[in-house]
Image: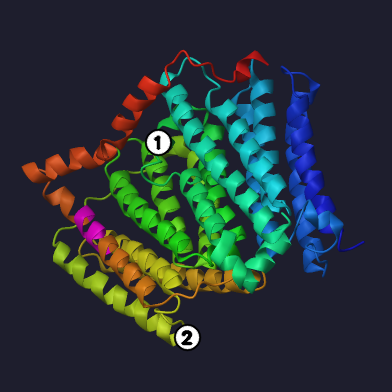
Amino acid sequence: MLDALPSLAALLGCLACLAAGAAARGDGPAARLIPAAGQVAFAASVLAALALAAGADGAAGGLARVARLDALSAAMLLLVAGLGLVVLRYSRTYLAGHPRRGAFLGDLALTIGAVQLLVVAGDLVLLAAAWIGTSLALHRLLVFFPERRMAQLAARKKFVFSRAGDLCVLAATAILAITVGTTSLDAVLGAARAGGDHVAGGLGAAAVLVAVAAVLKSAQMPFHVWLPEVMETPTPVSALLHAGIVNAGGYLVIRLADLVLVSDAALALLALFGAVTALAGAAVMQAQTSVKGALAWSTVAQMGFMTLQCGLGAFQAAFLHIVAHGLYKAYAFLSAGSVLAEPAATPAPDRPWRLAAWLAVAALAVGGGAVALGVDPVAAPGPVLFALVLVFGLVHLLWHASAGGSDARALGRGLVLAAGVALAFVAAQTAAATLLAGSVPVGPGGGAAAAFAAAVGVAAALLVLAQAALPHRAGEARWQAAYVHVAAGFYLDVVANRLARRLLPTAVSEPAAWTR
């Protein structure tokens, strides 16, 4: 009975949100009970996690074919249910008095329930159904305000990319069903680990399709063009989308990591798309002048970095990235208005050559620290790159805190803060590796992966230097021209919008949440 408890609890939470969302009409009693469904889902996720901690095997038994709970899915379920509860409670007040609040809350609950089902699905057919259902439910939220034409346009672009991703997932499911003989998640992962003749056949093709689906779902460049334009949707939708749903591609890859590892092409595809998206997204984010615009491009960059980690085989580090990004981005969107009360940023210090020296020292410190902790940068380039980028951010923080080295007190506070963050990072990485040791494999790494990670690290350092130099060269024509092009996102959205208006005219009907 104990082994079945995690699956039963997970299904209870999913069904509570799905049933409450389906029953909501107008602003009646069912709509007012939707936040309670979020509470039930969160309590159920806590119960499932406690049952696993008590020794239950959530991946055993017939019920696990529907809801499969291990350390990975239980942790993700806690994250999704917790964020869902916060967003539902926020939305109840956010849309107080709105005539379509009930419909909005219902679609929000449906979306949260579908994401929970995606996280715990123990069968690929159920996973594919939840994958598609999540996208369709989210689409209703994105088009909630019919008068906001940019939101409508962004939703149509996302709709096209999402359907392409759905086809990839369905095709991969069909290939795996033929190759393995079943769609059970345990059987598919077991076949991937066993290798043999399956690798030369369908598993490699299925792995590439999974990687393509993740690239489309997680808004990798150039398929990101819808994400910065959904800022006109209600704030709770932005919080749920950026903190949770856009992570679905990364979760799919981590969940099927044993399958993805059988294909070098799938790993290379993830690494290439991730690196380009992370670096370009970070550059565009720095050039944004609006809070929500910067947050949106931050999500693009973070999704790129998470995808890069998966491509390097650092699936455990990618999981930690998903959790950290989800918690941070939900808070950032729900509290975006408070930025107006914050003090203005201090001027950037001069002499960026000193910053370059600090970055070089930081890179040597990360390499030495990895060796001291027993981490081989060649065998595990993903976690080392994660640490390197984090330390580069801390160096930039110290650079501003010290005002170029003239304020010893500020520098001391910055050093203490940086040391605390670095220790927390090491502890979090260790905890994630321990938690997922039996659920998520570790990629083999190798010289090519390490060289690619080193190149990305150098590019990240150059980006930090450019950010530091720009305030002091803002009057130069070449920097002004570069700033305009970067702030415009390299005009990829302009091209996409022209194609969308030509191929997807505004006369195309949209699922109308407001007619409920």
Residue 174's x, y, as percent? 64, 49
Quarter-wise, where is residue 185 in the image? Answer: bottom right
Determine whether 369 is above or below 243 in the image: below
Residue 78's x, y, as percent? 68, 53
**Residue for point 51% across, 72% down:** 443
Quarter-wise, where is residue 197 in the image? Answer: bottom right
Image quadrant occupied by the C terminus = top right
Closer-to-camera residue (218/256)? 256
Amino acid at the residue labelled 1:
Pro
Residue 463 on the magenta segment: yes
User: For this view, does 257 lie left or right of residue 413?
Assistant: right
Residue 278's x, y, as percent? 36, 53
Closer-to-camera residue (172/315)? 172
What is the CA distance from the residue labelled 2 to the residue labelled 1?
A: 40 Å
**Circle 2 residues within 10 Å: few <14, some 14–19, many ≥20:** few
Q: Which mark is residue 228?
A: 1
The residue that mark 2 highlights is 374
User: For this view, does 441 lie left or right of residue 242?
Assistant: right
Res 91 visible: yes
**Residue for point 52% across, 44% down:** 246
Magenta stretch in the rendered image:
461-467
**Circle 1 residues within 10 Å: few <14, some 14–19, many ≥20:** many
Residue 234 on the magenta segment: no
